Image (cartoon, rainbow, N blue to C red):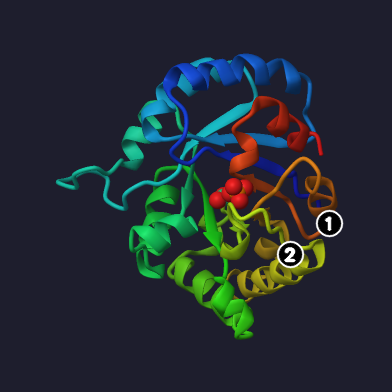
Amino acid sequence: MFRKALIAANWKMFKTPVEAKAFVEVFLPLVAGHERDEIAIFPSPVLLPELVKATQGSRIAVGAQNIHFAEEGAFTGETSVLQVKDVGGSHTLVGHSERRQYFGETDEIVNKKLHTALRHGIVPVVCVGEMLAEREAGRTADVLKRQIAGAFAGITPEEAGTIVIAYEPVWAIGTGKTATPEIAVEAHKIVRAEVAKLLGAEIAANMRILYGGSVKQDNCTSLIQQEEIDGALVGGASLKPESFATIVKY
Ligand code: PGA
């Protein structure tokens, strides 16, 4: 089985349209001809049109950091999957830990959003991961299983083919503390086994599981080269074209 790695940039609430364009101008030449991995960038919704335009003709996919589960409606401040699709977005993050922590996203909401993304042919990157207290209490496996089972409720093997998972231990996000390759691999195995239980061994074997949490130029290779780790979701180190390009080429 071969899983093409996906290296994804989560820009969070950083950059203006002008800065996004400037990033792409420097980044594209740095990754020209790099076909080994897929590359995706997840900017704020307001940057999507500019980024889609700037990356046109390249192999870089552009996606949203969040969608609402409804196609449209009276949901002030939200972005719909149809809007993302219409401006050329092809991917979306679902259930990032910052959404769960600060915006009250539950497993049930994550599940609804996953269904919505799949219904519209948007590639979902479903984020899971334990908090520090949960790890210290020996509850990591339980948390991951609960998050996966919750996210995947009602998803059939037929529609699951495009789903990507990102394992992001919350204690490693933006903290400079990275999971060791051993810790990450152990968690990825738990996640893959849970997917196998829910959707079958074949879907699980083909599903890409990315690692996220303080991925940097100096630790990306040892992580992504693990057979269990199928790419990375990169926050801080994706904001500079040079460091993100180095990670893409791990
Ligand atoms: P970080 O963020 O690389 O800055 O830790 C990762 C993420 O939140 O996806």
Left or right: 222, with 166 as reference point: right
Residue 10 picture location, percent across and down: 55, 41
- Residue 225: horizontal and vertical position, in percent? 85, 51
Residue type, numbered disc 2: Ala
- Residue at 49 percent of width and 36 percent of height: 63
Q: Quadrant of the C terminus?
A: top right
Residue shown at the point (37%, 68%) measured from the top left: 106
Q: Are marks 2 and 1 in contact (CB under 8 Å)?
A: yes
Residue named by callout 1:
226
In the rendered structure, the answer to whether residue 177 lies left or right of residue 74 reads right
CA gap between label 2 and label 1 equals 9 Å
Which amino acid type is shown beneath numbered disc 1?
A: Gln
Q: Dot 2: within a 10 Å radius of its alpha carbon, few (fewer than 14), some, or many (20 or more) residues?
A: many
Secondary-structure class at tag 1: loop
Residue closest to the eye, 25 or 90: 25
Mark 1 Cα-neighbour bin, 10 Å: few <14, some 14–19, many ≥20: some
Q: Position of residue 245 (x, y in %)?
A: 73, 29
